[in-house]
Amino acid sequence: MRDIPKDVTMSVRDPFDLTGRVAIITGGAGLLGAKHAEAVAEMGGIPVLLDLRADVVTARTEELAAAYGVQAMGLCADVTVPEAIEEALAKTLSAFGRVDILINNAMHDPKVEAGGQTGAHWSRVEGFPLDLWEQDLATGLTGAFVCSQIIGSELARRGKGVILNIASDLSIIAPDQRIYAREGVEADRQPVKPVTYSVVKAGLIGLTRYLATYWAQQNVRVNALSPGGVFDHQPEAFVTKLTNLIPMGRMATRGEYQGAVIFLCSDASAYMTGQNVVMDGGRSVW
């Protein structure tokens, strides 16, 4: 049994401070990944962005450094390739001498709108392409495991750290396929949210709980954040259907998850591990 930490009088703001802490963020140049990085930077941390798109990740890193006056680094890396993650970790340790946080955010998420309209829609279970199944699971789930295995092992070796897995409200509820339905399209041609999205996000919750207990004695905390839908100029009909399922009556903005990310990555959540924080405007309550 470990000793209970002594209570220390401090400002309520202090536990949220990430000054000097290094956070590796996969999918760091994406829609939410970039916002996670901004939050880390604003709280004094050092964001290390991993992304497949070299030009985009470089641009995002330069923007962060200029906007927040902090060190930042962008690396081109494939989360499904262990050697690439080992190299990214080595470069991070060489540049900053430490790593404190891993945010598993990378995800391959094919849009329902993609593909033609001849025959059954590609997203339907009956004809879902096996190669797409493998690609989606490789990036979203295997990639999270590979990064946790390699970077999490370094956190465990250091005796302290945080892993945050970005899941989804669809980790705990099924997608309502009615919001993807199109007028005048036969039932077997209707697009649906791909099965892989739910499988990956539910799998991340299992990975979260497993690692939370596996590395508990090494003081590595592992939690998940399950966001709801983020508004990104989707078609009006889709937005209307989705918001009708949300008690708060709207989708989230890109920046609304930043507070939760900082809470889960900082000492503010020091007595919290193995949990899934659902932040979906109340959708999963109905």
Image (spheres, grey):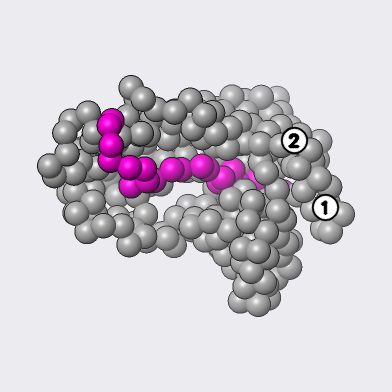
**Callout 1: 10 Å neighbours few (<14), some, many (20+)?**
some
**For residue 134, side relative to residue 192 (left or right):** right
Q: Mark 2 or mark 1: name the one nearer the start of the chain.
A: 2
Residue at 24% from the left image edge and 42% from the top image edge = 180
Return the mark for residue 82: 2
Tell me how far mark 2 sits from mark 1, CA to CA.
14 Å
* Label placed on residue 91: 1
Q: Residue at x 48, y 29 (%)?
A: 133
* Residue 115 counted in the magenta span: yes
Q: Is residue 269 visible?
A: no
Q: Amino acid at mark 2?
A: Pro
Which quadrant is home to the N terminus? top right
Task: Give the main secondary structure of the magenta stretch.
Answer: loop
Amino acid under label 1?
Lys
270 versus 273 height, above or below: below
SS class of the residue under badge 2? helix
Relative to 69, say whether 195 is above or below. Answer: above
Q: Furthest residue to the top?
A: 126
- Residue 213 in which image quadrant: top right
Query: Where does residue 123 sit, x and y in percent of width and height?
Result: 35, 34
State the image coordinates of residue 163 (x, y, percent, origin top left): 62, 41
Q: Which residue is at a point 24% across and 54% down the rendered structure image?
A: 239
Q: Which quadrant of the structure image shows residue 155?
A: top right
Q: Nearer the viewer, mark 2 or mark 1?
A: 2
Which region shows up in magenta? 100-120
Relative to 12, 186 lies left or right: left
